[in-house]
Amino acid sequence: MFFDDERSNRLRPQILTELVGQYMNDAERARLYGLPETTRIRERAKIVSPENLTIGEHCWIGEGATLDASGGLEIGEHTSIGLNTLVFTHSSWLANMALQNHSGSDLIERKPVKIGKGCFIGGLVVIMAGVTIGDFATVQPNSVVAKDVPERSLVAGNPARVFQRYDEDYIQSEIARVRAENERRRDIAARRGDNPTAWGAPGGRFDPDPE
């Protein structure tokens, strides 16, 4: 039933690690993969060649994401990778064109990917090999990133292009806005006896305060 060859024996430990990981929570799974203690990795996420992955503290990897680190992958601190996002650091295109798409083909091309710190990568994003995404960048869901993304920019589309640039003043104003709104909601929730929320804004309906 099981092959006893070099390739099978090399792949089997990672297969077993992924199987065991499905029964863990996101923090336990990160520890199993040898990721930083503050990183969380959700169910069905996969890391190819984890030995070539460098990832910072407080990162989040969503359900079903695939991180191909075979060509080298660096992810900065406080970055989130959305659900079912695909990060590629290799391509078999030339092997397919040459009809040499066999295991161990010497036509596989690898290029490293770097994703900066403080980035938000939405769900169902595809990041192609060789791309660098700058610090504090936002990639909207369903985008295909084939070229470098500048820092402090929002990109979207297929292929992804820049739609917005923002500076630190803008981020600080958004921080103040969200914290004020969350505080308002927590105050309303407390007055009506709702259970407190451990993080973020309380859920439910919160009409604007009457004048």
Image (cartoon, grey):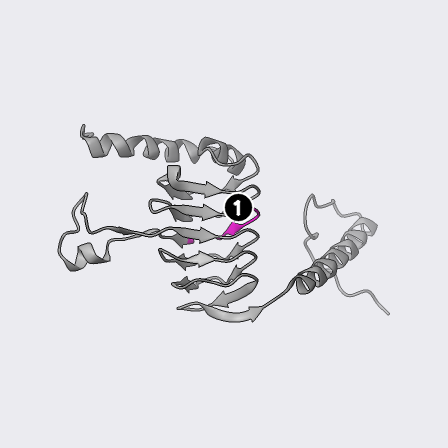
Residue at x-position 66% and y-position 61%: 168
- Magenta residues, as a range? 76-85
Secondary structure mainly formed by the magenta segment: loop
- Image position of 169 with respect to 19: above or below: below
Circle 1 Cα neighbour tier, 10 Å, few/some/many (<14 / 14–19 / ≥20) = many
Q: Quadrant of the C terminus?
A: bottom right
State left or right for residue 88 relative to residue 122: left
Residue at x-position 73% and y-position 61%: 177
- Provide the secondary structure element on which disc 1 rests: strand
Q: Position of residue 153 (x, y in %)?
A: 55, 65
Residue at x-position 42% and y-position 49%: 65
Q: Amino acid at mark 1?
A: Trp
Towards the viewer: 134 or 20: 134
Towards the viewer: 72 or 210: 72
Q: In this rendering, does residue 43 appear at all?
A: no
Residue at x-position 57% and y-position 62%: 152
- Please check the rendered image and state whether residue 78 is part of the magenta-colored stretch, yes or no: yes
Q: In this rendering, does residue 88 appear at all?
A: yes
Q: Which residue is mark 1?
A: 60
- Image position of 87 with respect to 29: above or below: below
- Image position of 9 with respect to 75: above or below: above
Farthest residue toward the bottom? Answer: 163
Farthest residue toward the top? Answer: 4
State left or right for residue 89 relative to residue 62: left
Q: Position of residue 134 (x, y in %)?
A: 51, 58
Q: Quadrant of the N terminus?
A: top left
Quadrant of residue 39 in the image? top right
